[in-house]
Amino acid sequence: MLGQRRRNLDWPYIEGLTIEEATHPLSLLAVGLYGRELPNQNGAPLRLVVPWKYGFKSIKSIVKIHFQEKQPPTTWNLAAANEYGFYANVNPEVNHPRWSQARERRLGSGFFGAKQPTLLFNGYANAVEHLYSDLDLKKYF
Amino acid sequence: MILKMRKENQIKSFEITSEQSYINRRSLIKSLGILSATPFFSNTFAENDTPNQKPLDFIKNNQYSTTEPVNSFEDITTYNNYYEFGLDKTDPIDSAQNLSPFLGQSQSLERRRILETLITKILFQPTNLKKEFIDCGVLKLGQWSFLGLAYLWWISSRNSNQPLMPSMLLLKQSTGPMRCLDKEEETLTGPILKG
C-alpha cells in the first residue's frame, strides 16, 4: 500500500492483546460502522476495536490472527518502546514522553474546540479495570 | 556569553495567562473572531455525506450503548490514522478510494490461483515430462520472471498481506540450471503456458 513505501514502521503492522482482553465483550471485531459496511479507510473488510485503549491497538484490515503463549512483539512498541507500551490503556496519569495525555479534544469539536479531561480507560473503567487489578498501570503502560 | 538575568519587575508568563485560558486558547482565538472565515471551508467533504457503503443487517446491543453524542459519519471516515495509507489523517480517505479490499483481494487471489495451478501442473505432470516441464516452465517463466514474477508476487501480496506462497518458494528453488530451448514447443503445449 502507498504508505508502506516509506519504511517508517516495520511492515506488516502487528498488534496483540492478552486473551482476557481479546475475549472481553467490549473488544470488537468490526465489519461495519454506523450500520454500514466498513469503508476502506476505516479498515475494511475486518478490523479490531478496543475502545479502552489508544487507537493504534485497534488494528485495521486484519489478514491473520495467531494465538500464542508469549506476548507478541507489536509494531509501535518495536518502533518506540518508551513511547508506546504493549497495553496502551487510555490513562490520563501516564503521559506520552512528548505530550500530556491528561486532556483530549473530541473529534468533531473542531480545531477551536475546548479540551476535556481524558478518562481512565477512556471511560470504560467499570467494565475493564478488573482485567488490570494486578498490574502496575504506570509500569505497564 | 549571554547571561539572562531576571529583573525585579519581570512577569512570568503564567501570571499573565491563566492555565485554563491557555489550554482553551484556540476557542479563545475563535471567540475573538480572528478567524471568522473558517465556515467558508467547512463543506470540503460534503460529497461524503451520503455514504456509499451497503447497509448491514444487525441488532444493536443496548448493553454497550452510550448517551454520549455521536460523531458525524463524515468526521469518522475522513479524519483518522491508517499509516499504510500515509501519515496524515486525511491520507486514508484520499488513498483508500482507489482500493477495493474485496475486489483487490479476489483479483490477487485469482492471480495467485492461476500461478498455483500453473506450478502444480508443472510439478505433477507424468514423470517423463516432469523434468522438461519444470525446466521449460521455469525457463518460460524465467523469460519474464524477474520483473513479471516480482510484479505478480507484489500484486498478490500487496492487498492481502499474505506471505510468499509455498509453491512460489518451490518455484524459486527449482530455478536451478535451466536447459530447455529446442524442446520448448513440444513440451509446453498446455494452454496455460501459451498465455
Image: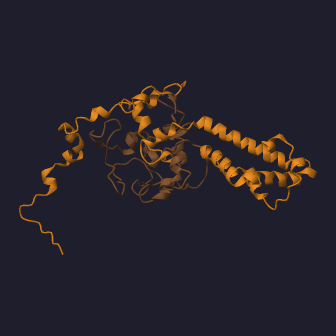
Chain colours: A brown, B orange
Q: Residue furthest front?
A: B182
Which residue shows up at 37% across the image and 48% down it? A91
Q: Is residue A35 left or right of residue B159?
A: left
The one nearer the camera, B175 or B65, is: B175
- Left or right side of B101 for B150: right
Query: Looking at the image, which is closer to me, B28 or A23?
Result: B28
Give me the residue at 41% from left, 53% from top.
A137
Tally of numbered tags: 0
The location of residue B128, given as percent across then percent down, is 93, 52
User: Residue pushed farthest right?
Assistant: B128
Residue plotted at (46% across, 29% down)? A34
Residue A3's place in the image compared with A126, above or below, is below
- Residue B24 in sight in this render: no
Spot occupied by residue A58 in the image (x, y as percentages of width and height)? 49, 44
Picture coordinates of residue B27, whole percent (x, y): 23, 40
Quarter of the image that includes the C terminus of chain B: top right
Give the image location of residue B135, x and y in percent: 84, 55
**Eyeballing the image, is B72 above or below A94?**
above
Q: Quadrant for the N terminus of chain B, please.
A: bottom left
Give residue B21's quadrant in the image: top left
**B122 or A28, which is in the foreground?**
B122
Residue placed furthest toward the bottom: B1
Is residue A19 visible in the rendered image? The answer is: yes
